Image (cartoon, rainbow, N blue to C red):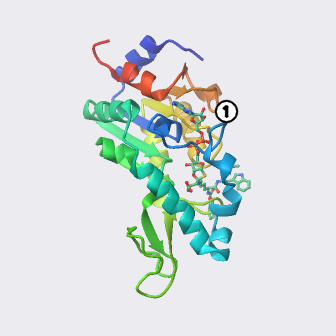
């Protein structure tokens, strides 16, 4: 595994098809708490208490209250230089797919266009009876009388099958695959970098810490995404 940013940049700019997988670390410099680690959201709130279907069934108001609190925190956050570098990378690429595990919407707020939200969106709700999704307007119940729930993917729930198929397809055909700010602990997203590597992509990981994905990466760039991504994406450096 190499750590040479200039060489990683050269290979990235040569790639015709680019896929990026992001996690909570990409939004950390915007002030959005990550899940795990010292400053992680789950140090304060245990996921098994709130981010799962059983918890919702037992106490939907409490789960909604937690999501509303997170909406409040994230509504005050702006995209950072990492999000903006990915907008620039998309603008200059002929084929670009951004796969994000984040539910905060900051990639879209920055201006990214081709974004797949693998774990759903903090800003959408879904009817527990009919399955229809809508913008979250603060309502707790659907017109049909059933509970609305956050349109996010909790543990043990399947991701959207079309999105999963699209993600693996993108990984397999990419020439460069960037993995940014994810602990690489959560399946199925954590399988994508290795699949991309197996199909011949140059895999470039950016993280403040090594992860279980680092062994599959050709390059590991250690440091904050907001600092390293602009350097990696810059054409005239
Ligand atoms: C920086 C930085 C900076 C910081 N710059 N870097 C055993 C038992 C039960 C289940 C399983 C099991 N084994 C496997 C499973 C499956 C399970 C899973 O993977 N569990 C593992 C934890 C073991 N997966 C699932 O259940 C998934 N579904 C599934 O598999 O379905 C199968 C199925 C098929 C058919 C029918 C039924 C089922 C669903 C996973 C859903 C994950 N959902 C969450 C919550 C979303 C809602 C919410 O937010 O409330 O998604 S969990 C949470 O983790 C969230 C994230 O998207 C996800 C990944 O976290 P991420 O992004 O990696 O964040 P962190 O905090 O972990 O890491 C941050 C990283 O950034 C760190 O590395 C830092 O170093 C770095 N960093 N600052 C760069 N400035």
Residue 135 pos. (x, y %): 36, 67
Relative depth, front residue between 235 and 79: 79
Residue 170 pos. (x, y %): 43, 42
Horizontal side of residue 17 vs 218, given as left or right: left
Give above or below for 166 relative to 202.
below
Horizontal side of residue 118 vs 95, given as left or right: right
The quadrant in which residue 214 appears is top right
Relative depth, front residue between 79 and 10: 79
Residue at 50%, 12% in the rendered image: 4
Relative depth, front residue between 69 and 184: 69
Q: Dot 1, crowdedness within 10 Å: few (<14), some or many (≥20)?
A: few
The answer to whether any part of residue 185 appears in the image is yes
Horizontal side of residue 211 vs 107, given as left or right: right
Label 1 CB, ligand 1: below 8 Å?
no
The answer to whether any part of residue 104 appears in the image is no
* Image quadrant containing the N terminus: top right
Residue 134 pos. (x, y %): 37, 70
Residue at 31%, 36% in the rendered image: 87
Q: Secondary structure at mark 1?
A: loop
Residue at 47%, 36% in the rendered image: 26
Give above or below for 5 relative to 12.
above
Numbered disc total: 1
Residue at the disc numbered 1: 212
Residue at 43%, 75% in the rendered image: 139
The quadrant in which residue 230 appears is top left
Relative depth, front residue between 21 and 31: 31
Residue 168 pos. (x, y %): 49, 46
């Amino acid at each position: 595994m190499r750590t040479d940013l200039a060489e990683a940049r050269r290979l990235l700019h040569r790639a015709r098809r680019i896929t990026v997988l992001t996690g909570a670390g990409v939004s950390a410099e915007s002030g959005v708490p990550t899940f795990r680690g010292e400053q992680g959201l789950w140090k304060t709130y245990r996921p098994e208490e709130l981010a799962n279907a059983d918890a919702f069934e037992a106490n939907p108001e409490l789960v909604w209250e937690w999501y509303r609190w997170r909406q409040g925190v994230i509504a005050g956050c702006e995209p950072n230089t990492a999000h903006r570098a990915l907008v620039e990378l998309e603008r200059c690429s002929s084929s670009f797919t951004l796969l994000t595990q984040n539910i905060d919407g900051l990639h879209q707020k920055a201006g990214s266009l081709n974004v797949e939200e693998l774990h759903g969106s903090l800003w959408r709700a879904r009817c527990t009876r009919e399955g229809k999704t809508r913008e979250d307007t603060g309502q707790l119940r659907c017109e049909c009388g059933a509970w609305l729930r956050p349109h996010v993917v909790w543990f043990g729930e399947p991701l959207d099958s079309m999105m999963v198929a699209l993600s693996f397809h993108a990984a397999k055909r990419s020439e460069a695959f960037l993995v940014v700010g994810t602990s690489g602990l959560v399946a199925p997203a954590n399988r994508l970098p290795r699949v991309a590597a197996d199909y011949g992509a140059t895999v470039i990981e950016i993280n403040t810490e090594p992860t279980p994905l680092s062994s599959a990466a050709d390059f590991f760039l250690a440091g904050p995404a907001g600092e390293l991504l602009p350097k990696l994406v810059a054409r005239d450096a």
